[in-house]
Image: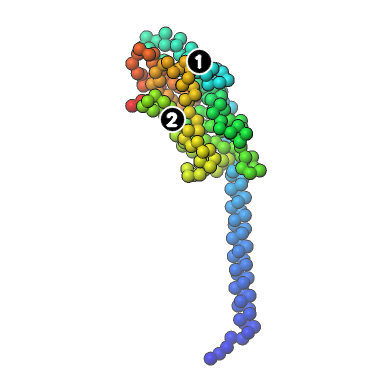
Amino acid sequence: MSLVPRSRRRGELGLVGFRGCCIGLVALALLGVAVAVLTVRLTATPDLGAAPGGTVDGQTPVAIGNKLAGELAARLRQSSSGEAVITVSERDLTVLAATENPDPQTFTQVQVRSQSGSLLVSAHSHLGPLPVLITVRLIPELQRDGSVAVRIEEMDVGDQAIPGFMQSAVDPRGNAAFSLSSLLNGTDLSTFGLDCLAVVPGGVDLGFHSPFAPTAPGLCPRAATAVA
């Protein structure tokens, strides 16, 4: 039986150790690159387009709802069918979202834009010491009971999409993050029957009928959601 020289065994052990060290350094370097890329994506500022536009009908949901109800009543009086549509502007939606902000110190500069048939709600926040921009794309949906619910289509921190199972860590309210309930309940708009809604350029169209007229789900554009 031949014996491997002691010096050779030491050399092989040294080579194994060197390889292990290199693998560890490469893994560490890759981890560092991944963290750097993720940090860049999280702190990126996506292009949200123009600032929210349209009219400002009040600084509270009640003020906005009552002002829009007055406009709606005037349109209904001029309508032979007892049906009319009003538009809640992006600026009014921004007021509503800011009013429903669960933590004004964590989420600042809240804004709402209408884009591609959905509502884009944005807010500045922070991730540890890093400033970040959080955006949530919402789809408003009219329920059978006449209430409006929202469905989260996407949530991003910077340019990084947040998986559904992690979204509650950003905002524990989930799909209740923003709705029109504060506008439709407790204001003069609640006296009218809501038939449909549609996200349109510049805001959200709401179709109503007078208390004595039948429902009119066809008032809103094709992209609208209406009571089935």
Q: Which residue lies at the image location 63% right of the left edge and 80% below the top edge?
A: 10
Q: Which residue lies at the image location 57% right of the left edge and 88% below the top edge?
A: 3
Q: Amino acid at mark 1?
A: Asn
Q: Quick check: 10 left or right of 64?
A: right
How far apart marks 1 and 2 lie (CA) works out to: 21 Å
Where residue 91 sits: x, y (%)?
56, 23
Instruction: Give above or below for 119 relative to 67.
Output: below
Q: Which residue lies at the image location 48% right of the left edge and 25% below the top edge?
A: 180
Regarding mark 1 in the picture, which secondary structure is present there? Answer: helix
Identify the residue under disc 2: 149
Residue 133 lies in quadrant = top right
- Residue 122 visible in image: yes
Q: Amino acid at mark 2?
A: Ala
Q: Which mark is residue 66?
A: 1
Q: What colouring method underlies this structural image?
A: rainbow
Which quadrant is home to the C terminus?
top left
Instruction: Give above or below for 162 relative to 191.
Output: below
Residue 110 lies in quadrant = top right
Front in this rendered view, residue 47 or 137:
137
The number of numbered badges drawn on the structure is: 2
